[in-house]
Amino acid sequence: MQQSSFNVRFGDCDPAGISFYPNTFRWIDATFHDLLKNFGGHAILCEKLDAKGLGLASADAQFRSPLTDGDLLRVTLEIEKWGPRSVTIRYTGHVGSRLAFEATEVRCLFKTGERGVFAAPMDAVRKILEEGTDG
Amino acid sequence: MQQSSFNVRFGDCDPAGISFYPNTFRWIDATFHDLLKNFGGHAILCEKLDAKGLGLASADAQFRSPLTDGDLLRVTLEIEKWGPRSVTIRYTGHVGSRLAFEATEVRCLFKTGERGVFAAPMDAVRKILEEGTDG
Amino acid sequence: MQQSSFNVRFGDCDPAGISFYPNTFRWIDATFHDLLKNFGGHAILCEKLDAKGLGLASADAQFRSPLTDGDLLRVTLEIEKWGPRSVTIRYTGHVGSRLAFEATEVRCLFKTGERGVFAAPMDAVRKILEEGTDG
Amino acid sequence: MQQSSFNVRFGDCDPAGISFYPNTFRWIDATFHDLLKNFGGHAILCEKLDAKGLGLASADAQFRSPLTDGDLLRVTLEIEKWGPRSVTIRYTGHVGSRLAFEATEVRCLFKTGERGVFAAPMDAVRKILEEGTDG
């Protein structure tokens, strides 16, 4: 559904010479935002949906092989499941044919209501992402 | 077993005004390295154990409430389980009494062998972390 | 005028084993925002001043000695000069008595006007920072 | 001499909605390392030159216009001056024809000697970068 590429660089790596693992989540998040760009980007979508953000309920990653300076990382994003108030997204990261990681994000559409921030129904988001339209 | 504190700052936050979630993993990793400091730190331990690093097999986080500029985040680390070739570590993040996140890391002792990098037995690491001694 | 401390950690360091230099600017910026916290923090000040941000016109650093995992970095901030539409801020970073860096930021009070973003007069900011009052 | 491109993304931006300025130095550093990749990359060059790193003596940036989520940043690198023990490098960052920043790095070839780390003569580095050869 979305594919983004990243050059893994010296500054992304730690004293063990491999990429500092929080950067993996940075590349995953960037891939998600690249997906949103097809629909105007995060800011425009949030305005349209009267939302604060398409933020995280949870995230996980399984690290299958290390990323190092010079690697060209290719991240693939697939929507795994739409819940009533969340969406589960699968990511895989490859360098050439080598699997670097598999990861999941569960995201919600956070809105601000009378009693604070809450996870709103996902129908409107789903419509936009699946049909490229808001109705 | 280990508790570390972090000031969440402006630069840790994104355009939605809450902390960019890869930073959560940065704070978790920092707490782990603070634990290691009681035993000489990552570099000295790796030299002692003839290892490349105490790196990640997997990581996950459940985000319970947002972190924002000005929050004082307190991260608590507990060893959950020792496997033969991995250790599972639990983290909780609080701001005052408010739960910000729960997270898990599975870490391995990576060594370089004849056929590349492999996850070595954890006995030596366990001994050091549990007894504060290497034998 | 303001002093902040930072633990330099494994994840802040690069494959050469010393802190990745953009992090120096992250610690400098954090020290500036710690200063603002004495006056309510960046968000509250911007609201009060009807501004977008106290952002950068320029920044520089001279790196005097390397920072490594385990260092406790102490950053000292001093206002060097108030200009009509900017403020020059001096930073020094020490680990114990060892000088790690000297740095400067020139910051402006950015507001949004009819013809886009502009650097507004600094009087109101100066009043708050020098007198701890807005009038 | 070298040109690299970067997508400015949501996670690179701060609560003011513009890119957190230490990231500018991250993109500058990445462009420098992209230059090195033409000659084998930082690790291989350091091995060849028996050096610890091509690190920073100083860095500065003048921010001319803000970078925001969705911008495609193009960074151009030019060697400005070779000193006996340093090299001065100029960077400019553009989004389309709009100037985003101008910056300078002064880098040294750091080696470890009997009395600690020192800045070594730059002749060997210059030869490699100018002639694409080490002799």
Image (cartoon, coloured by chain):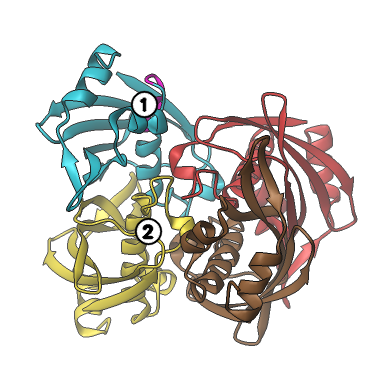
Chain colours: A red, B brown, C yellow, D cyan
Asked if one can make out residue A77 in the rendered structure from this viewpoint, the answer is yes
In the rendered image, which quarter contains the C terminus of chain A?
A: top right
In the picture shown, does residue B4 fall above or below D86?
Answer: below
Q: Quadrant of residue B21?
A: bottom right
Amino acid at pointer 2: Arg
The residue at which mark 1 appears reads as D36
Q: Is residue A63 left or right of residue D73?
A: right
Q: Could you say whether the residue bearing mark 1 is in a helix, strand or loop? A: helix
- Chain letter of disc 2? C
- Chain letter of disc 1? D
Find the magenta span and give its range.
D31-39
Residue A85 position in % (x across, y down) = 85, 58
- Seen from the viewer's position, the closer of residues C103 and A1 is C103
Name which residue lies at 66% across and 51% down. A46
Q: Is residue C125 left or right of residue A110?
A: left
Crowd rating for badge 1 (residues with CA inside 10 Å; few <14, some 14–19, many 20+): some
Residue D92 position in % (x across, y down) = 29, 31
Q: Is residue D114 magenta?
A: no
Name which residue lies at 86% across and 49% down. A123
